Amino acid sequence: MKKVKILIRLVERNGNTPCHRGHQVGDTFDFDADRGKLCPMAFHALFPYVDILRYGGSVPPSKDGRILVSCPDAETRNIFEIIPIHEQDSDLSDLATFQQTELILWQKMIEIYSAEDPAQISHTQSVVDYTQKIAELEGLEPHRIFLLKIAAILHDIGCPAARAVSGKSLPPMQEKEGARIAEELLQPVKAFSPEEKSYIVSVVGSHHQIRKAEELHFEPLFEADLIVNLLEGYYDRTKAAFYREQMVHTEAGKKIFNLIFQKDLH
């Protein structure tokens, strides 16, 4: 009998203390290939369920149909979802579902921008590309990179609505409208858990705020947007050294920033 492939995804955290292992909501692990990356306490909590499922058994699901297991850490309780992948599910794999979701949200973004501000489409693509590159160079887990890419696609989605309300797209109104629209666009999406949708909405609703970038761990997107805004002239390039010192915290972001703006840093 062929074993069932098992994915483990961190979908929720309860408690204000950071995870002692450094896990973040959105982290996803292949049980066979990545088990060494899992917190040992979480691994021991998950193993009895995984062992039953991978050999064709079943376990009681939660009320929403998912298989959820809590780690035993009393200070920060991570909630993991166990996702069995059967052979017959191969055409509906996580990868295919996520790629389709990205395409749909990308098309929605283009529809919103094309009527009023087509230039915003190329801006968004640049932010998505830099976000992905910084996140990859920082060694972030693939599913977390995907969540950041989706947030990057939607990061300025509130600009047209902000201009309609106030005549301008300044950050506070842009973020407020962006969070509202992102929540509406994500509501029917099945690829994300409620917690992951909430995370994306929170990032969109605070993507100009460096303290939120640190708190929610979306530094790659924050730094990507800063780089693109400098390149496009929205920010003063003569202040590039200030921006680098005050706002670029990842090593990958610093390297990319230095390469692009080397002439402006002297």
Image (tube, rainbow, N blue to C red):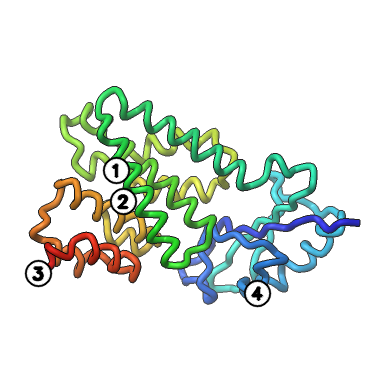
Above or below, comparing residue 265 to residue 187 in the picture: below
Relative to 157, 87 lies left or right:
right
Callout 4 amino acid: Gly
Q: CA distance from mark 3 to mark 2?
A: 28 Å
Q: Earlier in the sequence, mark 1 or mark 4?
A: 4
Callout 2 amino acid: His
* Residue 195 coordinates in the image, percent (x, y): 52, 50
Residue named by callout 3:
266
Q: CA distance from mark 3 to mark 1?
A: 33 Å
Callout 1 amino acid: Glu
The mark closer to the camera, 1 or 4, is 4
Label 3: how many residues lie within 10 Å, few (<14), some (14-19) or many (20+)? Answer: few
Q: Are marks 3 and 1 in contact (CB under 8 Å)?
A: no
Callout 3 amino acid: His
Q: CA distance from mark 1 to mark 2?
A: 7 Å
Above or below, comparing residue 149 to residue 52 in the picture: above
Relative to 95, 187 lies left or right:
left
Relative to 166, 22 lies left or right:
right
Q: Earlier in the sequence, mark 3 or mark 2?
A: 2
Q: Quadrant of the C terminus?
A: bottom left
Label 4 secondary element: helix
